[in-house]
Amino acid sequence: MILLLLGPLAAFSQVRTVTGTVLSGKDKEPLPGATIVIKGTTKGVLTGPNGSFRLEVTDPAATTLVIRYVGMTSQEVPISTTPLTITLQSAGKNIDEIVVIAYGTAKKSSYTGSVSQIKGAELENRQVSSVTKALQGLAPGVQSASQSGQPGSDATIRIRGVGSINASADPLYVVDGVPYGGNINAINPYDIESISVLKDAASSALYGSRGANGVIIITTKKGKAKGSNIDVRVSQGFSKRAVKDYDRMSVDQYFPMYWRALFNEGLANGNDSISSARDASQNLVGELGINPYGSAFPQPVGTDGKLVAGAKPLWNDDWSKAMQRTGHRTEANVAISGATDKTRYLISGGYLDDQGIYLGSGFKRYTVRSNFDIDARKWLKVGFNLSAAHSDQQAPPSEDSRSDNYVNYGRLMGPMYPVYQRDPNTGSYLLDAKGNKIFDFGDYRPDPANPRTNLVQTSGIDKHDVTRDDVSGRFYAEATLYKGLKFKTSYNADYSTRIKHDYTNPTLGFDAEVGGTVLKGNYRTFSWTFNNLLTYENTFNEKHHLNVLLGQEAYKFKYTYLEGSKSGFSVPGIDEPSDAALIGGFEGYSDNYRQNSYLGRAEYDYAGKYFFSTSLRRDGSSRFAPNRRWGTFWSVGASWKMTEETFLKNTSWLNLLTLRASYGGQGNDNLGTDRYYNYLPLYSVNSNLGLGGTFREFLFNEKLKWETNLNLNVGVDWSMFDNRFGGSAEFFVRKSQDLLYSRPKPPSIGYGSVDENVGALKNTGIELSLHGTPIRTTNFSWNIDLNMTHYRNKVTSLPQNEIISGTKKLMVGKSIYDFYIRQWAGVNPNTGVAQWKYTNPDGSIKDTSNYSKASLYYSGSSLPDLYGGLTNTFAYKNFSLSFLIVYSIGGKVLDNDYTFLMGLGGSAGRAWSTEVLNAWTPTNRNTDVPQVNTVAASWTGTSTRFLYDATYARLKSVNLSYTLPKTLMERAHLNNIMVYVQGENLFTLYGHKGMDPEQTVGGTTYYRYPAVKSLSAGINLSF
Amino acid sequence: MKKYILFIAIFAAAVFSACNKDFLDTRPTNAVPDDQVFNTVDNAETALTGIWAYMFETYFTFAVPGIKSLDLTSDAMGSDVALTTSYGFRDSYTFNEMSDNTKNRVSAYWTILYKTIDNCNNFLSKIDQVPGDDAKRKLLKGQASALRGWCYLTLAEFYSFGVTNDPSAKSVPIYTDPANPATPGKARSTVTQVYAQAITDLQAAVPLLADYSRSSTQKFKIDGNVANGLLARAYLYSNQPAKAIAAAVAARNGYPLMSGDDYNKGFNDVGNPEWIWGQPQTPSQNVAASTFNFLDVSTPVAYYKSYKADPWFQGYFDSTDVRFRLFQWSTSGPGALLYKKFRFRDPGGMVSDIVLMRSAEMYLIEAEAHARNNNAAKAAEVLNVLRTARNSHLFNGGGSVTDTILLERRKELWGEGFSLVDIIRTGGTVVRKPFKSYTGADSIINVPQPDGSIVKVRGVGHRTLKLPDGSAFVKNSNYYLFAIPISELQNNPNINN
């Protein structure tokens, strides 16, 4: 009996030796450093430099080996004594990846917090100048609003909604482990190894107050493999406007319409229709300042309101087109990386020239970075990471209501005004002595059409330059004090300076009369973070794993502002303040902000199955009064890797199932960049005619304190069928209380608001991310990644019934994203005037033509119901095709840009939307555009009339690449050559024509530089 | 061992830096805590200079360059300015702006005036405890009191009809104590009460300023003349003509009427002998001067040139009148009548001083006060002092002396901000007629050119001849009044109590 039992044991008790090689599936390259573990044990080996391994299996019961490699789908193979060749396929998103978290790293499959990670390779498929623009659609819970297409501009990032009303809602950026204080667009996306987005308390509470709006951790590339490797990447591309601008009237449409506006003015002033028509015909050309029909038709529109027979416009110019061009983009990057026994290094350089689609706009950037890690002693590791960036941005006015806004200027100019001077009788161009066309500055144009200007010409003379210099350094030393006990100290400084140089020339255009203007400003930011961390990590009794961190951190930030302006240049052609005569203004100040923190974290896991984490941090902020300065922030989290349990362990189709939950509190002290000292009874300083002045500009509040965010996160991660399909689902509740808010006050007390801690709000949402590899053969594979986010925002407490601010109203139970505006009631079919709704005291709802009498109503939300991204990647032999579609369903946008084109004739010469052709007339009574009339009250005030559905889907990026065959490359002594074409924003599905659907999270437009679409081609070399 | 030394050294450094108690104390560099303002009388004076600079030199928008633009609004809503459709005051002109509580301009003036009032309240509550020279303290108290009085006077002028129409009409709330975060909004006081507050403040200021003599380059400072001038306005507007006389006479003391040549110099120089009160401007401080972008219709640098004259207005002048010379028909663009009263002094620097009070107005107040006191002879005598200075025919009893004086105010003070004030306080009406010939045809003007030729111009007058609802201009129309901004209505539950 015993023999019977021991028999098999005896039979298998000899040691089996397994040998083999691990190769990558794509290029059949050996994979050094892959782990081969006997399934169900921790026993295993790593593959050597040539991908081979040798493992001795002593356990006779063992049947299976598990082979793992970072970034590849792990594989299980039966134990066999014949040499194995194991080919690992790369995983789209490896569920078992290592993710970068606060002050360390973690395995995603067992981490208690909520983290999304984006790999550098995913960024390489994009043609973006700022990392922020690349985040869209790649991670659930991350809302990226690229409202501006100005080259070099950043996108606004919101993680899990907005937890704050007035205080900053921007996430914290952490670069190489330490909060980053420089410009985010100084980071070359090419230098990025990975981006982690920390979304819940367990992952980000260790950053305390600074991580309340989520944390984006950027880790730059480092040297890895021994030897040295050189990578070169060069690309060239072109860009255009992503979506067409609003449709505007032609000259033939404009003239009769403006005639009608004048005619209606006459009627409104009590004249009869005959004299009104006569006056309108007579005055039309005078009012508009020009007759594009030539002197043969001195009154091109007859008293019947129609173009007279035979009248043909001699020109019909499109200024919007004239202000644009095809942008050109060049990018080149080089990186040299490698390692020796005791050092690892990477040096990289980048060049980018991104020319804008509007005249006079563009962005050039030069970046260098060097990362060094040195094992100075057996117990001591030191390293530094230095990066520098210089950029020259040409940023003409956009996102600005100025009349020289480059986007608005062309859009709003009537088509009857020629760009170049023309013969008024024939329409042919007038030429100067050299035979060149002459720009038309239109001193005859009415005021709304910007007389005496021509930005098409002066955009080439004037300057709107922003020069940035960023230097960032990370220095650390890590000492192993005792087994598992480490001390790490790091000093990290970010220096960023921006020089603005605005110049308008003294001879032509907007400021010619004052002899030109110049504004020069220097805005310098210097911040440092000094931290000291003590960590202890150990495993007890093989099953109890403990990791403890204790530390201290100090942060110092200084902003220095210096700006001066002058006017009156001595001679044209020079553009610095020294060249101008009159000082217009000179201002300078600096702001100081500091924080001091103590932090701790403990992580424990049992047998790789049960994971617990907790953290605690105390922050002191200089923004609050001494007795309210300190806040305590904390988190707890747990996860359960169910697939490690015996009852699931042998389920062959299920590779991973993890449940996790976390809860914790974080803080926010960021009232805004101009509000550092609001607890002090301050008098602002100014002056009058050389005499010093001070005045009380704001009410102070010494009771200001930390805003608190309480975050709950529950999630599940799974992976199945050899990790071919998997995903994560998460549910979150993000509560913010003691909101830092500028609470409105009756302005008659002298101040329109006071900063207070008021009320509470809640963001509740779900996030889903799925990935799959539906097809995986030797030559062909297809990966899909889909993510979606839905969240709702609700105000849960307020100190008063309602607070109205701008286009929104705060009220318990409503969202801060709910529009609270006037309700459009249509055009009165009998009178042709605009109407809005108002509620009588008795509750009945009526229509009124008096805008200010109209009542405000809740009118939908700017929040989308669902947003996210879908990535498909196809690989066939050496070809790879991937495309990313981002989508946003639901939500509304208030389009104030459009209202400029929807006037009723009060602004002579301004371009008109073709929609105005449908204006009310006695024969066209059922319409949504009121009667035109030059003296009518404006009807374009905020109302639901201009609230549009914001649903869209956009082909954000397409990338097709081809890797040259190995054989060819070996002959050329190259490791790798890849050629590719990339497209951005090539196709957009959206509703409201003319407006780019990507606008702010709050759902409002502001004369912004529109998004661009681009196409580029490039080559990647590695040798 | 070395590593422990290193560790201890770094740890000590960290603890030392972090435990430094002052590490978290930061101070602004462009503002000071109030105890550094109210520590000496001299420093306290900066609080008056500062709020004054705020009032005049703050852009709300380019169409609201400080409190001076309120004067332009008043004229845009009168009878004699035929505004163009240019950016700026066109919606005030059509009466679509100031009655609309959502408009930026509506909230801007409310904000400026009440912020100034609270700064004065705060100043007056503190100044008595500040150590320093008592004479200076007295003068500063006088200036703060007068400034607050001027704010309440301005509010009383525009937010309800005049006292003669309804003395208990609701005007605006009155605050005399400094605000704190808990201060509740107050209810509207009556127009009589608001005028009374203004008069109380100004009466308090006059004796405090009696010994004060300001430098002639600092005409922006409130002295005894200015306080008396404001008091004269307040008495006249609140229908206390008897009291207005002495105040007006005291105000103009030392400020003789300007010469005809000076009247033609562009109203841009605070050195004008007739100016009692004004805000000088410089190239680096010219927010208030940007009102000239609208008022100045002839200097190329002026951006909007929108304050064209109603052609009918020209008809009120004798051709000998020094003021008549300022009219000129524009021969380019629509045929507008330019009244070149306001011209940039230094176009390159966009500089023009701003007039706030001059003795001509004081003569007119005095004259009107006599008239309202039923002393027509004295009224005519005072009026004729001004007419003589302007080389206009003398008034000798033809028609109502009061009406003549009110018309003279329009002629003398065009563009200085009195149009709507006079319409509201007298219960008058806006008058706008189309500029057409008696047949209803266009008025064609022959404009002689320097070379002797004639250019024919189709004269353009008023564009808006009706109220926004299509009705005719009437007395005491609600469209004349300034609305209380929507932010006040939304955040002050007491406002209409």
Image (cartoon, rainbow, N blue to C red):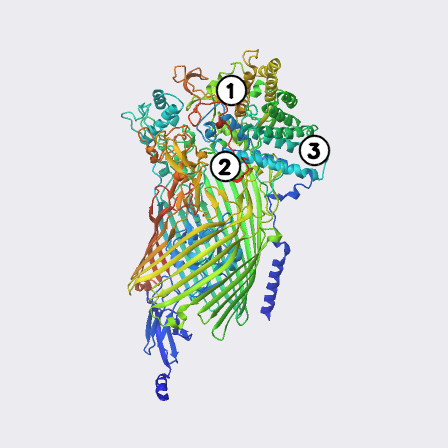
Using a 10 Å C-alpha cutoff, classify the residue at mark 2 as few (fewer than 14 neighbours), some (14 to 19) or many (20 or more).
some
- Report helix, strand or loop for mark 3: helix
Looking at this view, is B79 or A14 the one in front? B79
Pinpoint the chain carrying mark 3.
B
Give the labeled residue for mark 3: B138
Classify A861 as above or below B192: below
Q: Earlier in the sequence, mark 2 or mark 1?
A: 1
CB atoms of marks 3 and 1 within 8 Å = no
**Rendered image: mark on residue B326:** 1
- Residues flagged by tags 2 and 3 on a common chain: yes
Q: Residue furthest left?
A: A310
Q: Residue at x 42, y 75 (%)?
A: A43
Q: Which of the image's four quarters has the N terminus of chain A?
A: bottom left
Classify B383 as above or below A949: above
Depth check, mark 2 against mark 1: the one in front is: 2
Q: Disc 2 marks which amino acid?
A: Ile
From mark 2 to mark 3, how far is it between C-alphas? 38 Å
| Image spot of residue A279 (x, y percent) | 36, 22
Q: Is residue A462 visible?
A: yes
